[in-house]
Image (tube, rainbow, N blue to C red):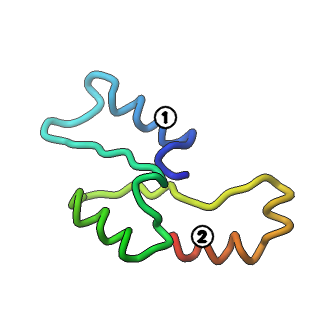
Amino acid sequence: RGGSGFVEKAIKMFVETEGNSKENESWVFLSSKDGDLRDRKATEAIFEKYKPTHVIHLAAKVGGLFANMAQKVEFYRENVIIN
């Protein structure tokens, strides 16, 4: 999920609180709907579109305990590709 999870929401709330962001800073919060980080071309398109100077990468394939246990290799592979 990356840009739409618990940590992202906390960062966004902090940044949007008056006095926490610096002058001339522009923050962009994306989610999996904005591009598939498993797809290199889609990822490159995101970087080309936004041209970030910094990235806080929070994306990961997650499931519940049983999904992680049942699909260990699939979760590992997708998360390695995302990173």
Across and down, in percent, residue 43 comes to 37, 69
Across and down, in percent, residue 51 comes to 21, 61
Please name the amino acid that badge 2 sits on. Asn
Number of marks in picture: 2
Is 9 located above or below residue 30 in the figure?
A: above
**Is 35 or 27 nearer to us in this picture?**
35
**Looking at the image, is mark 1 or mark 2 earlier in the sequence?**
1
Question: As drawn, which residue projects farthest toward the left?
Answer: 24
- Residue at 21 percent across and 43 percent down: it is 26
Horizontal side, residue 49 vs residue 40: left or right: left
Q: Which mark is residue 79?
A: 2
Please name the amino acid that badge 1 sits on. Ala
Q: Quadrant of residue 20?
A: top left
- Residue at 61 percent across and 72 percent down: it is 78
Distance from Cα at disc 1 to Cα at disc 2: 22 Å
Residue linked to disc 1: 10
Q: Which mark is residue 54?
A: none
Q: Quadrant of residue 49?
A: bottom left
- Residue at 31 percent across and 71 percent down: it is 44
Across and down, in percent, residue 41 comes to 36, 75
Is 30 located above or below residue 59 in the figure?
A: above
- Residue at 69 percent across and 69 percent down: it is 75
Horizontal side, residue 69 vs residue 32: left or right: right
**Is 10 or 49 nearer to us in this picture?**
49
Q: Quadrant of residue 61?
A: bottom right
Is 19 located above or below residue 83 in the figure?
A: above
